[in-house]
């Protein structure tokens, strides 16, 4: 295909305002395809292509399986599908989620870097946690150009700040200045110096991860040998997680293919912990309800009835304490052994 480079853009929370600043600055003669992944709900239609088409001179549309890359077109990852680059075509996949997201930014960035190496320009916009950091690092390692929106103007700067910690970003720009910079880079060969290229092991892992994201299986693609075994389990499928160290970023991937950075995994485990605590509170409530029903419906001697009443009240107190801990975890002493009635 006759175009000077490939632009890949990723964003999450707060990315739409950034895109509405960026897209109008792109000329109608923009010489490269633009591939865009923004985290979107899986079960809701997305109007992002229509919004972007109306915001600037370039047409935008949801990517379709097998689409041929076209200069001057914005291809948007559809909901619940990873967007990957395979040669001169696009591939859509419902492969395992990465960082609890599908589409995931890392998936797009990695596949683009493998396919076009130094011709890739990676752009990261506003978002939370750190999807995109690993993919942007891959772009940079293979000679591509990495730039990000300025964190100070981003609605959610966390993703950008995390990328800065791991990637040798070449430009940090307000969103309204990114378009002009892209034109400048495409008119000259994108940056191709910097760190040495990936070693054989890193390239093998990159190939395996792209294949997994594309939905081509896991075991036969080498997921079992990526990284070292950990003592952690996947919050998606409860499989064992392998630990991958990548330029200061710790990542995890299970044998099913789900992938997480350490920060995203911590957030997922926090949500799972809260869900488990609410489940425990529900079970305590059900025991209280059943004990009270038994006391009312069955004629018991006074000692047995009193014992059930006392047990119900202890369980009720435990449930109340547990709810207080769930809703106010920052309060010191919200849940201690001494505060649990009848703990022995």
Image (cartoon, grey):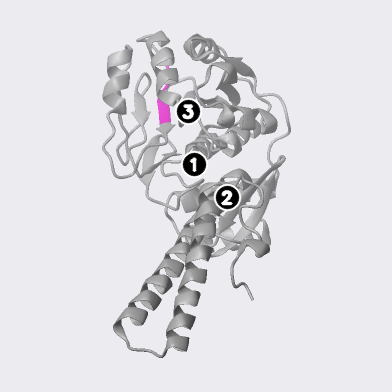
Q: Secondary structure at mark 2?
A: helix
**Could you tell me residue 84's position as x and y percent?**
43, 40
Give the residues in magenta.
31-36
Residue in view at x 33 percent, y 88 percent = 299
**Could you tell me residue 129's position as x and y percent?**
56, 37
Q: Is residue 8 above or below residue 268?
A: above
Q: Is residue 75 above or below residue 311?
A: above
The C terminus lies in quadrant? bottom right
Task: Name the foreground residue: 151 vs 221.
Answer: 151
Q: Is residue 330 left or right of residue 43?
A: right
- Do tag 2 and tag 3 residues touch (Cβ < 8 Å)? no
Residue identified by numbered label 3: 8
Determine the image quadrant of residue 146.
top right
Q: Which mark is residue 107?
A: 1
Task: Name the foreground residue: 328 vs 97.
Answer: 328
The N terminus lies in quadrant? top left
Query: Earlier along the polypeptide chain: callout 3 or callout 1?
Result: 3
Residue identified by numbered label 2: 265
Query: Earlier along the polypeptide chain: callout 2 or callout 3?
Result: 3
């Amino acid at each position: 295909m006759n175009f000077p480079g490939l632009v890949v853009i990723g964003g999450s929370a707060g990315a739409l305002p950034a895109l509405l600043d960026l897209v109008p600055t792109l000329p109608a003669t923009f010489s490269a395809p633009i591939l865009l992944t923004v985290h979107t709900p899986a079960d809701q239609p997305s109007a992002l292509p229509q919004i972007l088409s109306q915001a600037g001179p370039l047409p935008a549309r949801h990517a379709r399986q097998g689409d041929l890359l076209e200069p001057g077109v914005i291809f948007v990852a559809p909901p619940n599908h990873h967007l990957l680059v395979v040669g001169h075509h696009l591939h859509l996949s419902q492969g395992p989620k990465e960082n609890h997201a599908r589409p995931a930014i890392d998936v797009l960035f990695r596949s683009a870097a493998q396919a076009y190496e130094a011709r890739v320009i990676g752009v990261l916009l506003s978002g939370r946690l750190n999807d995109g950091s690993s993919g942007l690092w891959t772009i940079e390692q293979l000679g591509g150009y990495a730039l990000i929106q300025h964190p100070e103007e981003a609605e959610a700067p966390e993703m950008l700040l995390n990328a800065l910690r791991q990637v040798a970003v070449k430009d940090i720009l307000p969103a309204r200045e990114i378009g002009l910079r892209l034109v400048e880079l495409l008119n000259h060969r994108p940056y191709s110096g910097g760190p040495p290229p990936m070693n054989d092991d890193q390239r093998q892992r990159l190939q395996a991860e792209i294949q997994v994201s594309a939905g081509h299986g896991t075991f036969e693609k080498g997921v079992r040998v990526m990284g070292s075994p950990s003592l952690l389990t996947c919050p998606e499928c409860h499989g064992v997680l392998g630990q991958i160290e990548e330029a200061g970023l710790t990542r995890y991937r299970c044998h099913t293919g789900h992938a997480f950075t350490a920060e995203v995994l911590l957030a997922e485990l926090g949500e799972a912990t809260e869900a488990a605590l609410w489940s425990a509170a529900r079970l305590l409530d059900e025991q209280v309800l059943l004990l009270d029903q038994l006391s009312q419906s069955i004629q018991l001697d006074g000692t047995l009835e009193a014992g059930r009443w006392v047990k119900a009240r202890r369980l009720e107190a435990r449930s109340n304490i547990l709810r207080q801990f769930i809703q106010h975890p920052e309060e010191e002493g919200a849940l201690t052994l001494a505060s649990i009635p009848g703990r022995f």
